[in-house]
Every structure is written in structure tokens, then in C-alpha cells.
Image (tube, rainbow, N blue to C red):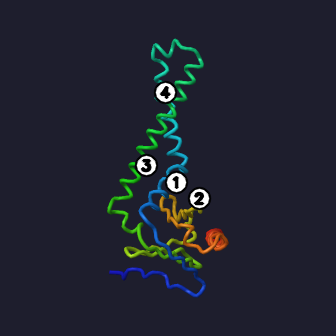
């Protein structure tokens, strides 16, 4: 039987970022990712428009003026969007509170090595090669490191002492991702 592969040895040319990630951070990040996912937003908008269109065929509204139809459509679409968004928020809170997220909430160390990005928590350690790095996105408060199509590491910008340090982190991630 082969011995398990050991984690990469950190050389002198690495950067270490330490931060703590709370349940509130997790919920905010998951909602940000959900609202910036084009497919999910397209599905949500489709259903927000589908139900009001069906409702326009009721006899009272069908006989009404064009202005009434537009008003009913926009009102119903807005109500549907709010309702679906509320359901999505509740689901994200329930998912975030589940026990399977114990590796996401807590203290993290992110090590930027020449060949990979290593993330360490109390519960796990994972290394992601730069050749598989997908993309870097950011919001006002967080960096979203898509290490694959489906795996995202969330890094709060508050862990950096200055805006300049956060920009240097972003540049270093992009430099390593683009060189592979």
C-alpha cells in the first residue's frame, strides 16, 4: 500500500495570510456567490417572469388596458423576485448552520507557494495547484478564490492591514495563476 502524499513543504518564497471566518461571513459570501452566478440568476428571473405572464391571462386582467397589464406584470415579478430571494436567504442560512461547514467557520491560514495555494484549518488542509486555478473575484469585503469551478475559498479583506496590502495579495494570486 502506498503511503499518503505529504503536504507540500513551504519554501522561503511563500506568503502567509491568517484570518478568522464567522458564520455571518459564510452566509454573506454564499449569498454573494449565488447572486453573481449567471445560471442561478437566469433561472430565478425566468420564474419571476413566468408566473406573472400566466397571471395576465385571467379574465379581469386580460380585459384591462396595456398599462394595467404592465403594472400587474412588474408588481408580480417584483413580488416573486422578493419571495424567491427570501427563500434563497433562508436556505443559505440553514445550509451555513449545518455541521458540515465546521471547516469553513473558524481560523484559516492561506499559504501562497510557487506551485500551489495551501489552505489550512483546524479540520483540514488542502493544496490547489495553480494550473487548476479557475478565477479570482472580489466584492467590497471579500476575495473569492475559485480554485476549481466548484470550490471557492473566501478571504475577508479585513484580514489585511491596508487596502494596498489587499491589492498586493490580489496581484500575487493573479500572477501565480497566470504563470501556470
Residue 83's quadrant in the figure?
A: top left
What residue would you read off at disc 4?
Answer: 52
CA distance separating discs 4 and 2: 32 Å
Q: Nearer the viewer, residue 128 or 121?
A: 121
Q: Position of residue 99 (x, y in %)?
A: 32, 62
Marks 1 and 2 in Cβ contact (< 8 Å): yes
Which is more toward the observer, 150 or 91? 91
Residues packed near mark 1 inside 10 Å, few (<14), some (14 to 19) or many (20 plus): some
**Residue 176, image x, y percentages:** 62, 73
Q: Within 10 angstroms of label 4, few (less than 14), some, or many (20 or more) residues?
A: many
Q: Residue 4: name its quadrant.
A: bottom left
Q: Which residue is mark 1?
A: 32
**Which of the marked residues, 3 or 2, is nearer the chain's N terminus?**
3
Q: What residue lies at 53% left-to-right and 41% top-to-bottom? A: 42
Instruction: Using the image, tell me which numbered label, if any, was put on residue 89.
Output: 3
Query: In the image, what residue occupies the spot 43% across and 65% down?
Result: 22
Amino acid at each position: 500500500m502506498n503511503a499518503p502524499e505529504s503536504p507540500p513543504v513551504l519554501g522561503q518564497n511563500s506568503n502567509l495570510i491568517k484570518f478568522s471566518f464567522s458564520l455571518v461571513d459564510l452566509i454573506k459570501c454564499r449569498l454573494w456567490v449565488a447572486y453573481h452566478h449567471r445560471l442561478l440568476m437566469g433561472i430565478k428571473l425566468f420564474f419571476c417572469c413566468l408566473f406573472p405572464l400566466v397571471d395576465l391571462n385571467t379574465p379581469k386582467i386580460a380585459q384591462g388596458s396595456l398599462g394595467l397589464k404592465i403594472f400587474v406584470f412588474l408588481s408580480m415579478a417584483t413580488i416573486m423576485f422578493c419571495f424567491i430571494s427570501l427563500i434563497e436567504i433562508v436556505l443559505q442560512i440553514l445550509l451555513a448552520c449545518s455541521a458540515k461547514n465546521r471547516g469553513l467557520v473558524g481560523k484559516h491560514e492561506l499559504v501562497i507557494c510557487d506551485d500551489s495555494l495551501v489552505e489550512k484549518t483546524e479540520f483540514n488542509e488542502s493544496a490547489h495547484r495553480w494550473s487548476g486555478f479557475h478565477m479570482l473575484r472580489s466584492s467590497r469585503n471579500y476575495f473569492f478564490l475559485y480554485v476549481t469551478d466548484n470550490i471557492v475559498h473566501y478571504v475577508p479583506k479585513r484580514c489585511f492591514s491596508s487596502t494596498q496590502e489587499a491589492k498586493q495579495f490580489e496581484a500575487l494570486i493573479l500572477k501565480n495563476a497566470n504563470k501556470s
